[in-house]
Amino acid sequence: MKKIALLNLGGTITSVADPKTGKLQSGTLTGKQLIEQCHLGDLGIDLEIKDIKSIPSPEMKCSDILDIKKAIEETLKENVGGIVLTHGTDTMEETSYMLDLLLSTEVPVVLTGSQRSAKDLGFDGAPNIRDAIIVASDEMSRKRGVLVVFNQEVFCAKRVIKTNSAGLGGFSDPVSGPMGAVYGAKVKYFYEYTPDKAIKILDEPLTNKVYLIKMTLDYPIEMLETLLNTDVNGLVVEGFGVGAVVPGVQDVLEKYVNKNIPVILVSKCHTGGVWKVYGSKGAAVQLEKVGCILDEGYLQGPKARLKLIAMLNSEYKDSIRENWNR
């Protein structure tokens, strides 16, 4: 009988409506109460339940993710065959990726949650937990990094994004599609996947002074100029298309680089990534010339920010340019 650990972190999946206001209150249900609805008797697993934190996911901080990482590492010492984490959906894509960056284990670590609360008709939390446990207990899930399981689909943490604010199919992978799917009590994988090498954190607490900006038509540069005069540690820019910014922004980004502040360029498009195609001012070719780092991994802006945070607090802090696309 395989031992699986469920680490409860709160979110909509643990929420119940306040009888006075009718609004959801996160963290109302314990992990044990959640499991009572999941019909796990046929899976033949030994389930250990731990209530680690109870945090609405918009309140999640880098320090919380480090705490979760440590809880996972302590649980791994118990020789579990897999770990499932319940988590709010709003920042699940970010927490899962940060854990994917920091953890070094072959054991499946799977995040799941729900779009509906436990008392709603059609509560999706119970089947999502069951599916996540099925994935975590399957040998084919090993060595795939951190996974997200939602609405019967399996996603890699690096690519998954929340694409629907309230619908049951809340998550997708625009680049590669779902890695697998759960049918009945089995998971079927569609392709192989090898996660990136883990980043070892050397300095705590993690800086959160890494800012994300998104290019829009006629973008004003004043905010970037002001930000430059603060204690900013890094900048991620979501550029137009294959990686372009408003021409005036290039001049400001060069100032960041000259102050040894790393600037990462990603595309704000869901697929396609950054390419050196155009030669005009503000295009990726010119941004690279002034010292910006072009992402080659199709990362979305929020995940590029987390990767930069991790690298700034690691052995790579003085060699981010050389190791960003490793």
Image (spheres, rainbow, N blue to C red):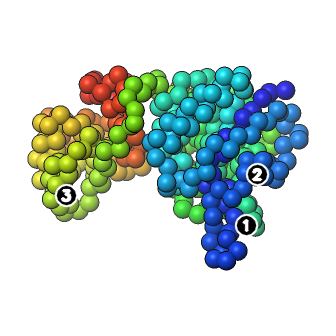
Label disc, if present, on residue 34 of the rendered structure = 2
User: Which marked residue is nearer to the observer: mark 2 or mark 1?
Assistant: 2
Q: Quadrant of the N terminus?
A: top right
Give the residue at mark 1.
Answer: 120
Residue depicted at 48% across the width and 30% down the height: 102
Using the numbered discs, state the Cα–Cα distance from disc 2 to disc 1 in whole angstroms: 14 Å
Q: Residue furthest bottom?
A: 20
How many numbered discs sit on the rendered protein?
A: 3
Dot label at residue 49: none
Instruction: Give the structural element (helix, strand or loop) at label 2.
Output: helix
Q: Tell me residue 64's x, y (percent).
A: 51, 42
Q: Is residue 123 left or right of residue 148?
A: right
The answer to whether one can see residue 189 in this image is no
Please tell me whether mark 3 sits on a helix, a strand or a loop: helix
Identify which amino acid the numbered label 1 is placed on: Asp
Evaluate if marks 3 and 1 touch, with contact meaning CB atoms under 8 Å apart.
no
Q: Where is mark 3, residue-wise? A: 223
In front of the other: 46 or 116: 46
User: N-terminal of the two: label 2 or label 3?
Assistant: 2
Q: Earlier in the sequence, mark 3 or mark 1?
A: 1
